[in-house]
Amino acid sequence: MAGLPRSVLAAARRRPSVPWTVAAAVLGILLPFFVNAYWLSTLVFVLIEALAALGLEVLTGRTGQVSLGHAAFLLVGAYTAAMLGVNFHLTAALWIPAAGVAAGIIGGITAFFSFRLRGLYLAIVTIGLVYIGQDVAQNWTTVSGGSGGRSLAAPSFGPLQFSKGITIAGLGITTNGLFYYLALLLLAIAMWYVRNLGRSRRGRDMIAVRDHELASAVLGANVRRTKTMAFVVSSVMAGVAGALYGSFLGFVQPSQFDLLLSIQFVVMIVVGGMGTLWGPVLGSLFVVGLPALLQNEVAALPFLAGGTRTSGMPVSDASAIVYGVLLVVFLLVEPRGVVGLAQRLGSLARRRREFSEVAGATQLTSELTSEG
């Protein structure tokens, strides 16, 4: 093995991931036909927030720029989509990328603060983005509708109207199903881009800036350009996610894009696994899916308030407690989150299998020797 080229070894390490990727793609395509409307809508939110969390993963997980203002970029994307889709009656093929561009511009401007600030100080500045965005949205009533919010149009791509659903080969796809496939497609494109970015020179510069900014600058990395690119990529994904989020809800208010939403995205990338491609997806599945699961099973859980039972803990409070506990546990025990835990269990299983094979071969050899 020591004599093999590095490229061959790298290809051998990557090959086992191909079947898992294909299996995930097949599962993602077929899943809407096996779940009810409640879980289908939950899956739509999972995919949309996974897209936004993937953007934060590029900024924080790969480049080390702490941001607690991610919700502000979703707000920009949502209201850009509302203005272009409702006021100007543009197709979703235009207002979805426009939402990403608008948020990317704000992200590029925000990157200038990261040139002089880092760590806690940068996090405080990004928190200010949330309050600035909410205040602007509440007072710019011609665009946002004020604190009362405004409606958004369902996506349309020429004759394809998401508000009506479609039928293909006798299979009916509802509005939620169309949103699901649109969010799945955009998330897949974003993951493909981030995967290739991680293998490029820019991606390696991001990792270098995260690990040691001064050393990366000495070795030739353009720190300012790297940080700017990370902020722009992160905010573009958040803007597109915000446009989908608002369109799927059909209505947005400035209060929806608060600091708590930004913190939830941080929880997603930490619990899912920072610095990993699938971490934001798994983290979003947990953060979005847990409240949905508790809400769906509230009647069977006596400590939760819901349905006809007025006493007990609200579902939101129970979810927040679980988030907090798991966040502490993963930071202390497994910093790479669920992805790191899965890799550790897989490595343990491989070692046990190899040990069993070696033990079996040793026993067979000893038996043949004794017979001879």
Image (cartoon, rainbow, N blue to C red):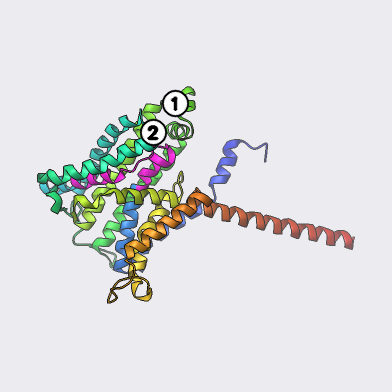
Residue position for label 1: 221
Disc 2 secondary structure class: loop
Q: Is residue 326 left or right of residue 263?
A: right
Residue position for label 2: 118
Disc 1 secondary structure class: loop
Residue at the outermost front position: 311
Which segment is the magenta one?
Answer: 53-80
Q: Percent from the top left, x then y, of residue 315? A: 33, 65
The answer to whether one can see residue 315 in this image is yes
Relative depth, front residue between 244 and 272: 272
Relative depth, front residue between 237 and 135: 135
Q: Percent from the top left, x then y, of residue 372? A: 90, 60
Dominant SS of magenta comes to helix
Question: Residue at position x 59%, y 40% from top?
Answer: 8
Q: Percent from the top left, x then y, of residue 235? A: 30, 40
Height in image: 120 above or below 251? above
